[in-house]
Image (cartoon, rainbow, N blue to C red):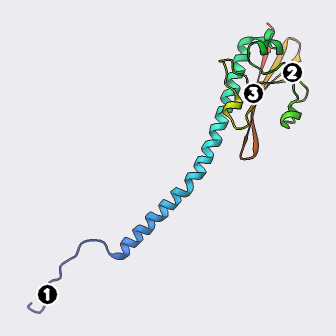
Amino acid sequence: MAGKTKRTKRRGFTLIESVVSMFTLLVCALIFAGSVPIANKSRGKAQNANIALSLAKKQIETLKHLGYANMVPSQLKASGLIDSTTGKNLTAVMLYPGATGTNSYEFTGSDAGLIDSPGDLLPNGRGFVRITDPSMDVRQVEVYVFWTELGESRFVKLAVRLANL
């Protein structure tokens, strides 16, 4: 056995193993970095939709609390729930095809401590209350919250019917 020499084992990583692991780490980092802007964009859209829905819910609950008898523009204005008693046509104002007539009242700038202003919380935010009388002793109240997002118009609509009991 004099002719055989012992080889000592070296421990550690080879150059190829190191390059492969760095490449894998780089690919993972690029995937993560590429997904961050998309996630932020989606989060922003969801946040705007949540704000609009929250505003519409608050407005509906406040209007329900006022009751059937107070669903007239003068009372809504006195309560600080609409900006003006002048009715607007949603089709003309927001290019919304579903609501015709001039029985919509804007609440974009109103804030009586009970609700928040869509104009302050959403990009190009506007809110409208629409009151109709579908039958005797019943009023339908619809709340619309519009905003723009990446050049597109978005909206939320909630409705409730109030009876004269």
Q: Does the residue at mark 2 contact the one at mark 1 (Cβ under 8 Å)?
A: no
Q: Residues within 10 Å of mark 3 (few under 14, many from 20)?
A: many
Which is more N-terminal, label 1 or label 3? 1
Is label 3 or label 1 in front?
Answer: 3
Under circle 2, the secondary element is: loop
Disc 2 marks which residue?
86
Disc 1 marks which residue?
5
Is label 2 or label 1 in front?
Answer: 2
When asked about the image quadrant of residue 47, the answer is top right
Residue name at image x 37 percent, y 76 percent: 16
Question: In this orientation, does residue 72 appear?
Answer: no
Quick check: 117 left or right of 97?
left
Residue name at image x 51 percent, y 56 percent: 32
- Residue positioned most to the right: 101
Instruction: Report the disc number at residue 108.
Output: 3
Mark pair 2, 3: CA separation: 14 Å
Mark pair 3, 1: CA separation: 89 Å
Quarter of the rendering occupied by the C terminus:
top right
Residue 89: image location, x then y, percent: 88, 29
Q: Residues within 10 Å of mark 2 (few under 14, many from 20)?
A: few
